[in-house]
Image (cartoon, rainbow, N blue to C red):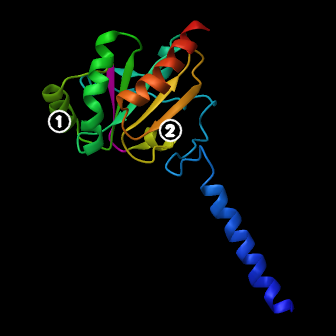
Amino acid sequence: MKRFLIPLGLFVVLVGFLAWGLKPGYDPHEIPSPLVNKPAPQFELSQLAAPDKNFSPLEMRGKVWLLNVWASWCVSCRQEHPVLVALSKTATVPIYGLNYKDTRADAQKWLDRLGNPYVISLFDGDGRVGIDYGVYGVPETYVIDKSGIIRYKQIGPVTPEVLSKKILPLVKELQKS
């Protein structure tokens, strides 16, 4: 009798895990970031277009802004790029780019050809800043509040739907406070 209890117990545990994964509202593709609601990692990087000029997120204190991690070799970045270009033309929120594990020349050519939605794009050639931000892959976009706190992380391309349903409402709410 005891030898049937162990397999039965394992079966019940397995069914519990399956039920958890199938519950309404659970998205297995959504990876929670441990950085959401925590201070954005500080850094100082050179600008992509002006290597002699640096930028630090401390310069953005008092402003709500987006940090978009991108690369010229990234297929999904090309998919989201028109959405970012259109957003930048509305001047709703400043977008700063973090060019990740790329070359300056390739990145600059990419922006020249497809348009530049960024107030400034920063060059993270070795990916160290990306690692500090917990980048899983590009593209990723962070909404950062006036106090320098990460309030949202979008993994994957920013789509018109994500922009209108998640990012812009959050930006507007954060700009009020």
SS assignment for the magenta stretch, majority: strand
Dividing the picture into quadrants, the one containing residue 70 is top left
Disc 1 target residue: 105
As drawn, 97 above or below 70? above
State the residue at coordinates (36%, 39%): 139
Residue 94 sits inside the magenta stretch:
no
Residue 66 appears in the figure = yes
Mark seen at residue 36: none
- Please give the range of residues in magenta: 120-126
Q: Secondary structure at mark 2?
A: loop
Total number of numbered discs in the rendering: 2
Residue contact at pointers 2 and 1, CB within 8 angstroms: no
Quadrant of image for the N terminus: bottom right
Residue type beneath disc 2: Tyr
State the residue at coordinates (29%, 42%): 76
Dividing the picture into quadrants, the one containing residue 97 is top left
Query: Going by the image, does 177 lie left or right of 13?
Result: left
Residue 124 sits inside the magenta stretch:
yes
Query: Residue furthest toward the top?
Result: 176
Percent coordinates x, y for residue 74 in the rendering: 27, 44
Residue 56 appears in the figure = no
Q: Residues within 10 Å of mark 1 (few under 14, many from 20)?
A: few
Disc 2 target residue: 133
